[in-house]
């Protein structure tokens, strides 16, 4: 199949293009102009960086494609990035879906997030649907935009676009060049203090998610959604395991919800003076305090999905950081 992958220069995209190439598909990889292509430039694919919110660009890129994997997204949470976040997560998604319908794309695989389902306060695992408590409207604008972005894509189902939605969990593994978890691993390796969050999530190997996305294209049901998630654990448990694996001298310190939210307020206030995105804000703190858990039975039964081994994902992530982004002294 001829495949377009948006967000191909990112963490998930870099793993997805490898999965597609290994399966014998032809790949066009795109990302925002100026994106680092270092992690995919030596692969047998076409790199075409583009602003998909610009007039005509979505139409140009989807022309001749059979599958479109929309992976690109703005994962920021700072309020100052709200306009950019909405443009990327909502407008871009709708533009690409509309262009794909017009171009006769055979299948559109939209990458959403478990966050659109919210959570159950009891910690119960949620299937592919809303839980009793929402993560929207709490100042965690990323979830709000991902809900709206999925709605913008699903609007084209009624017009004939074959859409399958995937909901990845908290992914760990190689090619995380933004060092989302790498910063924590680096701090642990260097003997610095680290902190774990009071909530929980559904953790999985990013390579398993990439495999599940390809399976969604080949086996998924039009209009269906699939949780590509996995091990439902607290952040404290996962961070403790990370510390054990990397041989950290100091174990992570568990932060209570109130302390994390207070820090979020303080960091957000400080950002007003530095004009730089804070590492925490109140909405993100509330999200990280939520007992999120996910049921991936449907993906297992219909896509043969499995989340991978968490220890292996952590080990391979740490090795990748060591080789590609060595720690500074």
Image (cartoon, rainbow, N blue to C red):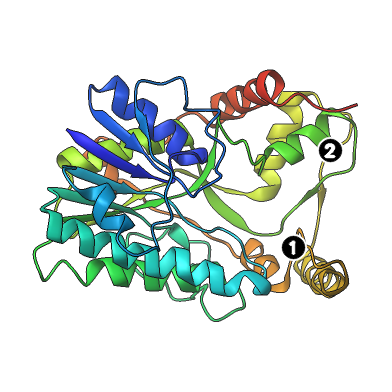
Q: Which residue is mark 1?
A: 277
- Residue 34 is tagged as none
State if disc 2 and disc 1 touch (CB < 8 Å).
Answer: no
How many other residues sit within 10 Å of disc 1, few (<14), some (14-19) or many (≥20)?
A: some
Q: Quadrant of the N terminus?
A: top left
- Which residue reaches farthest bottom? 137
Q: Earlier in the sequence, mark 1 or mark 2?
A: 2
Residue 271, picture quadrant: bottom right
Query: Is 74 drawn above or below residue 30 in the view shown?
Result: below
Q: Which residue is mark 2?
A: 251
Query: Is 227 drawn above or below residue 90 in the view shown?
Result: above
Q: How far apart are the two marked residues, 1 and 2, measured between alpha carbons?
A: 27 Å
Query: Is 172 drawn above or below residue 111 in the view shown?
Result: above
The reply to whether residue 302 is visible in this rendering is no
Query: Is 235 drawn above or below residue 153 in the view shown?
Result: above
Q: Secondary structure at mark 2?
A: loop
- Kindly identify the residue that appears in the image at 25 percent across and 23 percent down: 23
Q: Position of residue 252 (x, y in %)?
A: 81, 43
Q: Quadrant of the C terminus?
A: top right
Residue 16, picture quadrant: top left
- Residue in front for this viewpoint, 168 or 102: 102
Horizontal placement of 237 versus 252: left or right? left
- Kindly identify the residue that appears in the image at 47 percent across and 27 percent down: 40
The reply to whether residue 27 is visible in this rendering is yes
Q: Position of residue 5 (x, y in %)?
A: 34, 42
| Circle 1 or circle 2, nearest the eye | 1
Q: Position of residue 250 (x, y in %)?
A: 88, 35
Horizontal placement of 38 versus 190: left or right? left
- Kindly identify the residue that appears in the image at 40 percent across and 39 percent down: 209
Q: Position of residue 167 (x, y in %)?
A: 38, 53
């Amino acid at each position: 199949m001829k495949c377009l992958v948006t967000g191909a220069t990112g963490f998930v995209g870099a793993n997805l293009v490898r999965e597609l190439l290994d399966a014998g598909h032809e790949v066009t990889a795109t990302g925002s102009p100026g994106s680092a292509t270092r992690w995919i430039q030596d692969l047998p694919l076409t790199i075409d960086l583009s602003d998909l919110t610009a007039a005509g660009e979505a139409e140009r890129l989807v022309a001749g494609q059979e599958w479109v994997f929309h992976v690109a997204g703005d994962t920021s949470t700072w309020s100052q990035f709200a306009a950019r976040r909405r443009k990327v997560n909502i407008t871009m998604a709708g533009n690409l879906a509309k262009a794909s319908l017009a171009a006769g794309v055979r299948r559109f695989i939209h990458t959403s997030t478990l966050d659109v389902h919210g959570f159950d306060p009891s910690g119960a695992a949620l299937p592919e649907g809303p839980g009793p408590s929402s993560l929207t409207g709490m100042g965690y604008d990323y979830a709000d935009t991902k809900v709206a972005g999925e709605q913008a894509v699903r609007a084209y189902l009624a017009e004939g676009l074959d859409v399958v939605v995937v909901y990845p969990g908290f992914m760990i593994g190689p090619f995380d060049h933004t060092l989302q978890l790498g910063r924590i691993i680096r701090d642990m390796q260097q003997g610095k203090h680290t902190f774990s969050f009071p909530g929980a999530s559904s953790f999985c190997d990013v390579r398993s998610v990439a495999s599940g996305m390809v399976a969604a294209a080949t086996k998924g049901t039009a209009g269906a959604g699939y949780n590509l998630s996995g091990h439902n654990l607290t952040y404290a448990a996962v961070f403790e395991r990370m510390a054990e694996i990397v041989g950290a001298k100091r174990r992570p310190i568990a932060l209570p919800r109130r302390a994390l939210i207070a820090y979020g307020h303080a960091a957000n206030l400080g950002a007003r003076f530095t004009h730089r995105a804070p590492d925490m804000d109140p909405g993100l703190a509330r999200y990280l305090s939520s007992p999120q858990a996910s049921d991936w039975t449907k993906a297992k039964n219909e896509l043969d999905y499995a989340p991978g081994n968490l220890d292996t994902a952590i080990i391979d992530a740490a090795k990748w950081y060591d080789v590609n982004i060595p720690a500074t002294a």
